[in-house]
Amino acid sequence: MEVLLLMAVGACAFTGSAVLLSGGTGDVLRSGGRVAFLASRRAERALRRLAGLRVVELALSTGIGERMVREAREWRRLASRGREEVMAVLLAGLALVSVAAALLFVTPLAGVVVSCALCAAVVARDGARQRVKRREVLAEMPELYRTLAVAMGSGQTLAQAVEYVGAHGRGPAAKVFARMSLRLRCGAATEEAVSSLAEELDVPGARLLAAALVIAHRTGSPLRDLLLRSARIAERQGEFERLLAVKTAQVRLSVRIVCLLPVVMVGVLTLISPDFQQGLLTPSGMGCVCAAMLLDAVALFLIRQIMRGVT
């Protein structure tokens, strides 16, 4: 905090002396404009260099990185930037926030804690969004099965049925069908379009739906009974998942609290306790914390495996 105060006082003193020596604000504004222009050019060069780093490629190779870049490009200032430049901007912002935290708490450990907390928050937010999207798709699938059965049972081709579903459906699953219809219009092969549909849906039964659509396209059979039965199965599966979520809500909350509490305590103590910071910088302190985090990670992995076996 004292460091930031000294920096602010120095900046104010520099600005005031510049105004007094220049005898007015016009020269200061003109010089400030030149400085801003030079700073923007150097920032552009630094951004291009950062975009070519290996860490940017590694971040973009993950699904979370791709989704973050897609969301960040919705901002007006980043809309015209490339994927690598947008990811470089995000990583530079993370580094600046970490440095600011290290200056604020007068310890480099604060920067590490804040950066880890921000990364964990991004991962948790992305995971929550993916779970919400998956639930929406699962809830939408029975109606899509019935719509496909009606469309293909009335004599429409696969391309016409998919276009009908994409045009009349609402939700993320209908958008996937709309993209499949666009691929078919652009001349993509039916098997390729159906395979892309199964990958984008990413729900139980998507492969079965893809196989049924390919069979219907090759044989000309509408498969109306199969699609209606799939709709009933999807409805029952949605009911079972909702019942399981209600039954295991308390257990999942307890697991989250037990697993997150040690991590949160270590982070808070690192930020506010000088004695804990000194102990953490010693080899024995670092070893104890790493061992505790490793045991916590092993416990979380075992719990996930048990929950996956139950679900």
Image (cartoon, rainbow, N blue to C red):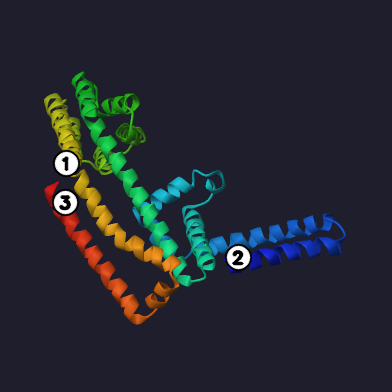
Instruction: Decide: few, some or many residues near mark 2? Use Cα within 10 Å; few <14, some 14-19, many ≥20.
Output: few
State how many labels appear: 3
Q: Position of residue 45 (x, y in %)?
A: 59, 63
Q: Earlier in the sequence, mark 3 or mark 2?
A: 2
For the N terminus, give its image quadrant: bottom right
Q: Secondary structure at mark 2?
A: helix
Q: Earlier in the sequence, mark 1 or mark 3?
A: 1
Instruction: Decide: few, some or many residues near mark 3? Use Cα within 10 Å; few <14, some 14-19, many ≥20.
Output: few
Viewer-proximal residue among 190 and 266:
266
Q: Is residue 44 left or right of residue 126?
A: right
Q: Is residue 299 left or right of residue 184?
A: left
Q: Secondary structure at mark 3?
A: helix
Determine the CA span between mark 1 and mark 3: 12 Å
Q: Which residue is mark 1?
A: 247
Q: Which residue is mark 3?
A: 307
> Which residue is at a point 42% across and 77% down the rendered structure image?
278
Determine the CA span between mark 3 and mark 2: 48 Å
Q: Earlier in the sequence, mark 2 or mark 1?
A: 2
Q: Quadrant of residue 198?
A: top left
Point out the frontmost of discs 1 and 3: 1
Q: In the rendered view, would you say 234 is above or below 272?
A: above
Q: In the rendered view, would you say 259 is above or below 282?
A: above
Disc marking residue 4: 2
Instruction: Decide: few, some or many residues near mark 1? Use Cα within 10 Å; few <14, some 14-19, many ≥20.
Output: few
Q: In the rendered view, would you say 14 is above or below 154?
A: below
Q: Position of residue 242 (x, y in %)?
A: 19, 36
Amino acid carrying label 1: it is Lys
Viewer-proximal residue among 126 and 114:
114
